[in-house]
Each structure stands twice: as C-alpha cells, then as structure tokens.
Image: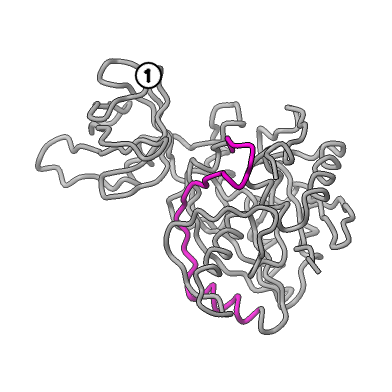
Amino acid sequence: MNLSDFNFDLPDELIAQHPAANRDSSRLLEISPDGQFIDRPFVDISSLLKPGDLLVVNDTKVIKARLQGAKDTGGRIEIMLERVIGEDTFVAQIKSSKSPKVGQALKIDGAAEQLVVVGRQDSFFVVKVIAQIDSDPGVDLTDWFQTHGKLPLPPYVTREVSGDDEARYQTVYAEHAGAVAAPTAGLHYTPELLAKIADLGVEITRLTLHVGAGTYQPVRVDDIQEHKMHSELAIVDQQVCDAVNRTKAAGGRVIAVGTTSVRSLETAALHSAGELLEPFSGDTDIFIYPGFEFKVVDCLQTNFHLPESTLMMLVSALVDRDTIMAAYQHAVEQRYRFFSYGDAMFLYKRSRD
C-alpha cells in the first residue's frame, strides 16, 4: 500500500488547540461491527462495554521534556527529549540554525549543569549532562527535566503552554514518568467514569509505554512497508498478562485504550511462546499496518490521527482502510475535533473470514 492511501483533507480549524471543558464532555464516533457510524457523547462508552470485558490503559506520565538554551557559539537551540538512556545521558531532537557537532557544549536556560553532544543515533543526538563540579553527585534526569523543562505540547498545538495543560495533558491514572507525549486516548476518562465502568463488571488493567518524540516523525517513503518505526520502551507485566489470559479464557473482549496499548499488547504477544500472553519489558518498534494479524486486541478506543501517519495505518489494520477513510470524512463533516485534545473513536476488530 502507498502512503497516499492514508491521506485526507482536514481543515485547520478542526485541530483542537484546547481540551474540552471537561474530560468526558468530548464526543465519540463509534464504528459499529457492520460499519455504521454512530455519533455519541464520550460518556456513552460505558454502554459499549460488557461485563467480563477488560479495559487496558497506558499509565505513562508526561515529563517536561522541552528545553531551551544555546550552543557554546551563542546560537539558540531547542531540545526535545526522546528518551533517557543512562544516569546522565539522553537521546533528543535538537532544533537550531545549524546542527550541533559531536563534542559541542550546550547551555540550558536556568541550569547550572552543562550539556555535551556525545554522539548521534539516527536522526537524534546523544547528550550527556556534565556536573557543575567534580564532587557533584550528579542529577536525576527526570527531576532535572521537571525543573528546567517545559511541558511538550504536540507541534500541531500552536499556542503556548498554559496552566491548564499541566493537568489536562496527563491522564488521571498517569503514574510512571517517562513520556514526552501523552497517551491521548486516555485523556477523556475521569475517576467517576472509570468507577462507573468498573461497576459494570469491566476489569481495568495498566501497562506502560513511554511515548517518545519519534511519534511525531512523518512517514517519508511511498511504500509503507519500507517505513522504519521508532523504538519506545514498553512494559507489560504479569498482572496485565493474567488479566488478558483470564478475559480471553472466559470469552470476554480485550479493549485497548489508545494505540500505545495496542502496540504494547501485540508486541508482548509476538514475544510469547504459546497461546498465553507472557510479560514483556523492552524496546518495541512494532509497525502495525493492513494485513497485520491481531492476537490480543478486540476493540480500540482512540483519538483521531494525522493524515498519512502510522496510526492511521494501525486503525486501518484493525478495521479496514475504506471504512476508516469514510469514517474520517464523516468526522470532518460532523465537525469532530482532531488529534491530542480532540474527540475519540470506538473501533471493533473486523473479522477477516
């Protein structure tokens, strides 16, 4: 399939620049198993769930991953953390008029520590934090970014970060710090809605995938099978596996909240020796596109995605491309709000029989 097969026209005014007034006051487009489009308020998601279902969420927490500073030559830079790879070393995107060279020193606004570019990793830079004095015990990088960084809103949110974003660009169940982008499908849930879902007899379990800045990188090849996915750290523990295996054995459905949950679960399945899901902890670069055989996920609640993105390909794999493209056209016509702070979809895995 070609990249252009996943393109669609989206008016700029439909790209949500702010979250909805309340988390669960967004809208939900259900694509029914027979391909019908049903417009709902998001709180109706509870009516789409059944006793015995399993809801799988991603509990990663966004850190303040955007830094501003200057090169030792004086040129201004912006650093976007991709991931921490050591006690004092991280991988990042660096924007500047001229790319910094390996060995070049960088100074971050307001920070005493100096940074040094120590290498390259594909299109990213490997950066080391240098302590101010030799006796300095060093820094906790997560805390250091929280002190000196800014919340990394997506590039299509074109305004400055506001106080509301500190809370609203995190899920209510965010726990493990490490993401540079929110698992935005989960932004719609409130504690009250989650409690209502649990009261229905739906089990809720948590995995972790730390979303990296690579999630915003475009596909640059026409033949999508030639695309190389970025890697992200995924953790699917024994508790998640037990919940999935128990649900499957009882005939229930596994419902992923967000594409990060899908990618984590299906990665674990690919690394499992038998029919039962086994724990997985490590990097995943799984690329899901039409033709992929899902082993775990039965349904997906997700937001609307960018044209020609790998996430458009993932949802097309779960349903089918023609239905997804028609659903997106419907969403545009009905003035749904798109992307991270936008509205949501509920999808059922299409039978291939």
Residue 26 percent coordinates (x, y): 75, 46
Is residue 228 within the magenta segment? yes
In the rendered structure, the answer to whether residue 200 lies left or right of residue 224 reads right
Residue 217 percent coordinates (x, y): 54, 37
Position of residue 124 relative to residue 301, above or below, is above
Q: Residues within 10 Å of mark 1 (few under 14, many from 20)?
A: few
Position of residue 93 relative to residue 250, above or below, is above
Residue 323 percent coordinates (x, y): 83, 50
**Residue carrying label 1:** 98
* Residue type, label 1: Lys
Position of residue 236 relative to residue 113, above or below, is below
The span shown in magenta is 219-247
Q: How many marks?
A: 1
Q: Nearer the viewer, residue 166 or 186?
A: 186
Is residue 22 within the magenta segment? no
Q: SS at mark 1?
A: loop
Q: Nearer the viewer, residue 309 or 144?
A: 309
User: In which quadrant of the rendered image does the N terminus lie?
Assistant: top right
Residue 40 percent coordinates (x, y): 84, 52
Which residue corresponds to the image point at 77% horizontal and 49% vertical from the top-left? 321
